[in-house]
């Protein structure tokens, strides 16, 4: 079975991946999802990569999965440990030759109108009560329910993850 290193995005925690990690473990895989030192203003991408590499230890053939800002960290992890596969999920990727610090200006993020995005959850899940989903919610928290009363955050995937020809089984 494979070992997966799951890298969260900016301002989040390893717990972000808890549902995916549970599914991977149920399939016999190993999953690690370390907390990056996001609260340490002196830490940068090298320290983030060191955190993941330290958590990975001497595992060989690691599958590195990175989301959002983790897309900046993942290639650095690939230079530090034996990686079989890199998977990027909605990653932030700088243009060739562009420094990650230039990403915000290059994408014109600061020019995006913000007045309509003051409550991201309501934007994504209309009818969801404000504050119903919070970053860092505790494991075992009740699922968020949509306007029809059905859960919109399922406790796991409906079926087992499919392993394609390039993914470890």
Image: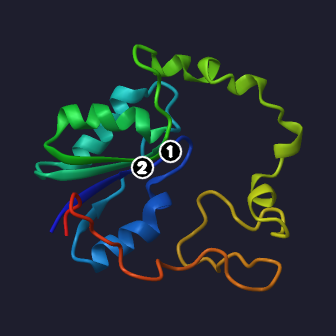
| Local secondary structure at mark 1 | loop
Q: Residue at x 30, y 44 (%)?
A: 52
- Binning the other alpha carbons within 10 Å of mark 2 as few (below 14), some (14 to 19) or many (20 upward) gives some
Q: Residue at x 78, y 86 (%)?
A: 149
- Placement of 70 over or under 13, stated as above or below: above
Hey, which residue is sitting farthest right in the picture? 115
Residue 98 is left or right of residue 54, and the answer is right
- Placement of 88 over or under 30, stated as above or below: above
Which of the 4 quarters of the picture holds residue 73? Answer: top left
Q: Which mark is residue 104?
A: none
Do the residues under discs 1 and 2 have CB atoms within 8 angstroms?
A: no
Q: Residue at x 68, y 22 (%)?
A: 108
Q: Residue at x 77, y 23 (%)?
A: 111
| Local secondary structure at mark 2 | loop
Looking at the figure, which quarter contains the C terminus? bottom left
Using the image as rendered, state which of residue 102 and residue 42 is in the foreground.
Answer: 102
Give the spatial CA distance, label 1 vs label 2. Answer: 10 Å
Question: Is residue 37 in sight in this rendering?
Answer: no
Which residue is tagged 1?
Answer: 9
- Binning the other alpha carbons within 10 Å of mark 1 as few (below 14), some (14 to 19) or many (20 upward) gives many
Residue 145 is left or right of residue 32, and the answer is right
- Placement of 101 over or under 159, stated as above or below: above
Q: Which mark is residue 35?
A: 2
**Number of numbered labels in the structure image:** 2
Hey, which residue is sitting farthest front in the picture? 165
**Residue 115, percent across and down?**
89, 38
Which mark is in front, 1 or 2?
A: 1
Using the image as rendered, state which of residue 126 and residue 53 is in the foreground.
Answer: 126
**Residue 156, percent across and down?**
48, 78
Choose the circle earlier in sequence order: 1 or 2. 1
Using the image as rendered, state which of residue 162 and residue 141 is in the foreground.
Answer: 162
């Amino acid at each position: 079975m494979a070992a997966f290193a799951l890298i969260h995005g900016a301002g989040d925690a390893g717990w972000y991946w808890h549902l995916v990690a549970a599914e991977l473990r149920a399939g016999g895989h190993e999953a690690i999802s370390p907390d990056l030192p996001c609260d340490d203003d002196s830490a940068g991408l090298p320290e983030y990569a060191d955190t993941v590499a330290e958590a990975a230890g001497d595992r060989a053939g690691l599958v590195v999965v990175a989301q959002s800002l983790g897309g900046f960290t993942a290639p650095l992890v690939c230079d530090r440990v034996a990686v079989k596969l890199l998977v990027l999920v909605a990653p932030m990727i700088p243009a060739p030759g562009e420094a990650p610090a230039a990403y915000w200006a290059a994408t014109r993020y600061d020019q995006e109108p913000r007045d309509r995005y003051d409550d991201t959850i309501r934007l994504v899940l209309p009818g969801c009560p404000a504050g119903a989903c919070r970053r860092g919610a505790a494991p075992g928290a009740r699922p968020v329910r949509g306007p029809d009363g059905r859960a919109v955050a399922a406790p796991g995937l409906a079926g087992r993850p499919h392993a394609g020809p390039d993914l470890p089984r």
